Amino acid sequence: MDPVAELRGVAKHFPGVAAVEDVDLAIYPGTVHVVAGENGAGKSTLMKLLSQVERADRGTILIDGSPVHFAGPRHAQSLGVAMVYQEFALAPHLSVAENLFLGREPMLAGLGAGLINRRRERDAAGQLLERVGLSLDATRPAGTLSIAEQQLVEIAKALAIDAKILIMDEPTATLTEREIDELFSVIRGLRDRGIAVLYISHRLDEIFRVADMVTVMRDGRVVATRPAADLDEERLVRLMVGREITNLYPKRHVEAGPVVLRVRGLTRPGVIEDCSFEVRAGEVVGLAGLVGAGRTSLARTVFGADRARSGTVEVDGRPVRVASPRAAIAAGIGYLTEDRKREGLALQLPVDQNITLANLPSLGGLLRLRAERAVAQRRRDELDIRTPSLRRRVQLLSGGNQQKVVVAKWLETKARVLFFDEPARGVDVGAKAELFEIVGELAADGRAIVLISSYLPELINVCDRILVMREGRIAGELPRSEFSEEAIIALATGVNSMNCSTNHEVP
Ligand SMILES: Nc1ncnc2c1ncn2[C@@H]1O[C@H](COP(=O)(O)OP(=O)(O)OP(=O)(O)O)[C@@H](O)[C@H]1O
Ligand SMILES: [Mg+2]
């Protein structure tokens, strides 16, 4: 079989970084081809070269055997290359149907010539949505769709241009387990129809669930391309990081001390209802629940980013009024947000300033600069933040390295309580282990940690206790001795999964 796309000796350099270096790669139709590698390895850049968002410095890209002369992403689309970005590009105020045919609208003939044939647009949209398993009204504004639905619309858009190659950059980062299952069945369907799916992911479990082929990149180069069947987790990790990682979720044993955070009856109508919990010094407490259960809202309310209508918050036995994030930080509460782009980082500022942004308020001038530099250097080494310079604007770092900067920033605070909201999202395996190592250190240092994560193995391995939220309430609590994915899911859904499966067998 001939490859549908081929890269030969392709390279792309940015100031101070060889993002992609001398890459040869063949992509075959009817294959799910995963690209894996550490943060900053060059995965996203390679995909941007193929989809002609970026122009290669060197090398040849062939589609269906013919060399492509760079003319931008529209041109790539006309050749059948479609890319679904992690930050979606749908126009929120336009309908789903309008989004699907933007710039390629079916036109009316005869009297109405020059006008868009809305009826045909709607019908065609319905057919495309069906192909990705979405049953929704195509006249709805795209902005009213859930993230998972928007993603499927993006895929439908790719089908609308008859894509032969569909590129997805970390598509599951914001999806729930159920949505991930649905996405995977759509992907398999596309593959079975001969489409080549290129898929970037950091989640090992996922890679082995969908991949036919795996390409591993390190420092801009391809270090291996293998059938997924020839790899296992251990081998894959070794290829990615070039060394063995024995423990992906290091957990430190810390004796719990006095209560640091006490929350009583916290309520924000319609979002969180009567939430009460405590976290002791040295404890890592997990916050589990389905997307929308209120985990992030609870954290934001304790942090003063959202207003509570009633309830109290105490830190180290002292009542605090969390009227704003500033007040919360002053009271010793830190919140590492899940949305790094919007809330976590000053993208235009350099790495070192971002790391020290929430701190060092009292230092001025030269002293501050020097302190900033030293702190940033230490965190860069610990978390292995890949950047040619600490003075580089955060915007220019790879996705995972941006996330590491957010983490570094909060590690620097003197906060007594730290909420980590999906801290490991988009972070590579090596750095993930490092991150949880540091979480353990913070706990051992007598701080109280709350970890929000949708990835259950992470919670189960790293936490001392898990609180499970459902519909804005804390539905239950599990001690470490009772941790299991089933127990968490049962509390999160309010459905005992064992009962559920017997029900299914009743004819
Ligand atoms: N527009 C740009 N300007 C400068 N440097 C860039 C630019 N885009 C990417 N880089 C750099 O190129 C390197 C590769 O980045 P890339 O985004 O391809 O990595 P990645 O493998 O996708 O990482 P991640 O897993 O963190 O998303 C990084 O060092 C990054 O900082
Ligand atoms: Mg990337």
Image (cartoon, rainbow, N blue to C red):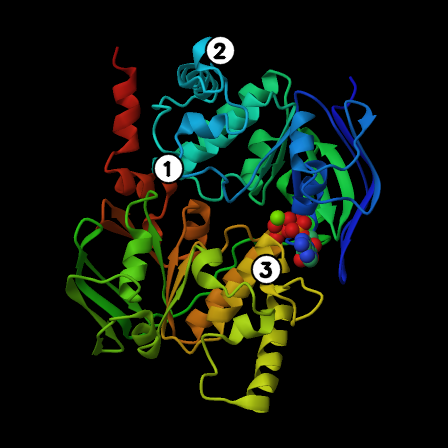
- In the image, residue 289 above or below residue 320: above
Bin the neighbour count of mark 1 within 10 Å (Cα to Cα): few under 14, some 14-19, many 20 and up: few
Quarter occupied by residue 211: top right
Q: Amino acid at mark 3?
A: Gln
Position of 389 with respect to 24 (left or right) is left
Q: Along the line of sight, which residue is nearer the eye, 75 or 246?
A: 75
| First reached walking from the N terminus: tag 1 or tag 3 | 1
Mark whose residue sits in front, 2 or 1:
2
Instruction: Name the residue nearer the viewer: 477 or 358.
Output: 358
Contact between labelled residues 3 and 2, with CB atoms less than 8 Å apart: no
Count every numbered label the image shows and give the total: 3
The answer for how far apart the CA atoms under marks 2 and 1 are is 36 Å
Q: CA distance from mark 1 to mark 3?
A: 26 Å
Q: Nearer the viewer, mark 2 or mark 3?
A: 2
**Where is mark 2, residue-wise?**
109
Position of residue 462 measured from the top left corner of the image (x, y, whole percent):
44, 56
Tell me which numbered mark, 2 or 3, is placed earlier along the sequence. 2
Q: Quadrant of the C terminus?
A: top left
Q: How far, Cα to Cα, is label 2 from label 3?
A: 47 Å
Q: Is 87 left or right of 208, judged from the image as shown?
A: left
> Which residue was labeled with disc 3?
395
- Residue 412 x, y percent position in the rendering: 49, 75
Q: Amino acid at mark 1?
A: Ser
2 or 1: tag closer to the N-terminus:
2
For badge 2, the amino acid type reads Ala
* Residue 393 image-quadrant placement: bottom right
**On the image, numbered disc 1 is attached to which residue?**
146
Within 10 Å of disc 3 (Cα), the crowding (few <14, some 14-19, many 20+) is: some
Report whether residue 422 is seen. Answer: yes
Q: Is residue 370 left or right of residue 413?
A: right
Picture layout, residue 382 above or below residue 49: below
> Which type of secondary structure does the marked residue at label 1 adopt?
loop
